[in-house]
Image (tube, rainbow, N blue to C red):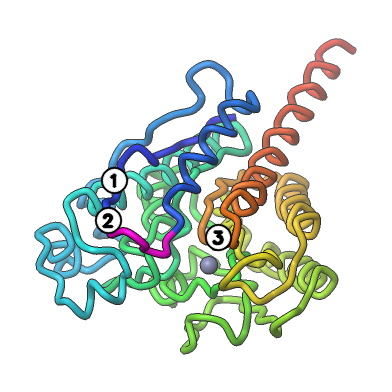
Amino acid sequence: MKVFYSDHFVLPLPEGHRFPMVKYSMLRERVAQDGICGQGELRTPRAVTDEEILRAHSPDYLKRVVSGTLTDKEVRRIGFPWSEKMVERSRRASGGTLGACLAALDEGFAANLAGGTHHAFSDRGEGYCVFNDSAIAARAVQAAGLVERVVIINTDVHQGNGTAAILHGDPTVFTFSVHGAKNFPFCKEESDLDAPLPDGAGDTAFLATLERGLETALDAANASLAIYLAGADPFEGDRLGRLSVTKSGLAERDRIVLETCRERKIPVAITMAGGYASEVVDTVDVHLQSIHRAADLLESAADRSKETHRT
Ligand SMILES: [Zn+2]
């Protein structure tokens, strides 16, 4: 399976910063160790261009991000100190989602070991999100004439508020978000379909809500590409999550999303979104099981097609 990584574009953070930057390189190392990618399939994405970013963001915001002229308040809202490296990393992370979308359209599944920066709005960033990779990638594949309709499936514990706002009123991209009702962002936006959950929901309620919402979303979306935000923060050991979903519950989430899309012949690009477990290795485990599930499904599809050719 093709997997895109950008963890070597390091974003310099002050000592003690709470963002778990190390999860990205740990995840890439485990993806490499586990043999998920064939020769040349673990790839560095290109940076998205200004033209691509401007399909999702305002010219003024892009200009101020690139030139480092955001106000202190805007920088605080993003949560990262501004640097040229921050801009480059944000472009690469969006490039990873675009690369995963293009690879998924060819092969069924692909992943970006970053992205899911769903709190970025057209004219501002927040919650560690600078550019909205989902909106940028969806509109890039549409502009290339590869797909007409896209569905964005947010299962990160935080609502995809920036994604919902950017794509609000765009009938060609359906936004679905299952998230913690009482969690950040405290002022929610309106997705095409929102499925808020109470604190401490647990596996059963989380999965039942996801399954129901997913069917409704896919029926309404009529999409030929899905972008799946497989956030690790619904996990019970997450410091910010509060949804009390177990690792096996999250593995079941991946199975439901990926198998349902496959049954409907919808290619899926997986992105990482959040994950703030007390032990970073737990976050990495949760992300890795999403990647494994997709790779296993790809492999079983390849085996089946070999069978068909033989008989
Ligand atoms: Zn999150």
Looking at the image, do the residues carrying marks 2 and 3 touch, with CB atoms under 8 Å apart?
A: no
Q: Is residue 120 magenta?
A: no
Looking at the picture, tell me which residue is in the foreground, 206 or 153: 206
Q: How many residues crowd around disc 1 within 10 Å: few (fewer than 14), some, or many (20 or more)?
A: many
Q: Does the magenta stretch include residue 15?
A: yes
Instruction: Residue at 27%, 56% (x, y): give it.
Output: 53
SS at circle 3: loop
**Amino acid type, label 3:** Gly
Circle number at residue 48: 1
Q: Position of residue 6 (x, y in %)?
A: 38, 40
Looking at the image, do the residues carrying marks 2 and 1 touch, with CB atoms under 8 Å apart?
A: yes
**Amino acid type, label 2:** Ile
Q: How far apart are marks 2 and 1 (CA)?
A: 7 Å
Instruction: State the residue position of label 3.
Output: 275
Instruction: State the residue position of label 2.
Output: 53
Instruction: Residue at 70%, 32% (x, y): give it.
Output: 298
Which residue ends up furthest to the right in the rendered image? Answer: 311
| Quadrant location of the C terminus in the rendered image | top right
Tell me if residue 119 comes above or below residue 139 in the rendering.
Answer: below
Q: Where is residue 23 in the image (x, y as percent from the top left)?
A: 50, 48
The chief SS type of the magenta part is loop
